[in-house]
Image (spheres, rainbow, N blue to C red):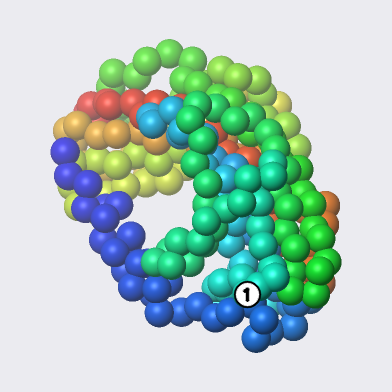
Amino acid sequence: MKAKFFFFPLLTGLLLFSCNRELSNTVDQDRIFTVYELFYNANEDKTYARATFHFSNELGTRLELADPSNVAFDGDPLTFNPVLAYYEREYAGFVQSGVFEWTDTEGNLFRNAVEVHPISYAADIDTIARDGSYELFWSGGPLLANEIVTVTINGENEQDAQVFATNNQGANSIILAKDKLEKIGHGPGTVFMDRSFIPPVSEAPGAGGRLTGRYRPENQEVFID
């Protein structure tokens, strides 16, 4: 099955991020926008703790922390990736919760606790028909406030991936609409599902921030009929 849908944007991103970053001591510390994510990928059985720093807002220039600024997760220092311009630490297995700690160049400490809410497919999927809508059920509890489930289906054809999402509180399923399913090529495909918990940040500079706990169960290989 082709995978170019994922590789081309990644290559483009690598070029952009590697060229577009500055040191954090060149900007007003109160204008740094913080992005934290704790992400568990069941396909790898690995958890990633990631922190990204931007100037002014989430679309702003990415920043590399300058001494003495530093960032850690549960006391473990995160390592800077100079190509993707973010900080990361990997853990074996499922890490359900923890605390990000960032100290800026002026010695101000910001602490933000995060948790990941598990999700799994309620049943294995063999075939998804394109001649009508499809209701996909999950297990792991209904959606709570500040949660969203995203389902991406990548089909056989180039650039035919479709994204479906719901944030309806109490939901245990998501409706995959017919008009989007029709755009996916006939043949084998892959279903990716993510459950994201995005509570308000507890502590951040004036620019604000975003905090996410995300869980991805093992992908489902399906036939798009």
Q: Is residue 124 visible?
A: yes
Given the current orientation, which residue lies at the most extreme front position?
A: 68
Residue 57, picture quadrant: bottom right
Given the current orientation, which residue lies at the most extreme top position?
A: 123
Q: State whether residue 211 is above or below residue 117.
A: below
- Given residues 145 and 100, the one toward you in this image is 100
Q: State whether residue 116 is above or below residue 135.
A: below
What is the total number of numbered labels drawn onto the structure image?
1
- Given residues 122 and 95, the one toward you in this image is 95
Q: Give the left or right position of residue 219, taking residue 94 as reference.
A: left
**Residue 76 location (% of width, % of height):** 63, 45
Q: Residues within 10 Å of mark 1 (few under 14, many from 20)?
A: some
Q: Residue at x 40, y 73 (%)?
A: 18
Q: Residue at x 50, y 78 (%)?
A: 21
Residue 156, picture quadrant: top left
Residue 173, picture quadrant: top right
- Given residues 142 and 185, the one toward you in this image is 142
Q: State whether residue 104 is above or below residue 120.
A: below
Q: Residue at x 40, y 79 (%)?
A: 19
**Residue 152 location (% of width, % of height):** 40, 41
- Given residues 221 and 167, the one toward you in this image is 221
Q: Give the position of the N terminus as an image quadrant.
A: top left
Q: Is residue 178 visible?
A: no
**Residue 125 location (% of width, % of height):** 34, 19
Amino acid on which the number 1 mark rests in the picture: Ala
**Residue 12 location (% of width, % of height):** 32, 68
Label 1 sits on a secondary structure element that is: loop
Q: Which residue is mark 1?
A: 66
Q: Give the left or right position of residue 182, taking residue 62 as reference.
A: left
Q: Give the position of the C terminus as an image quadrant.
A: top left
Q: Residue at x 49, y 41 (%)?
A: 90
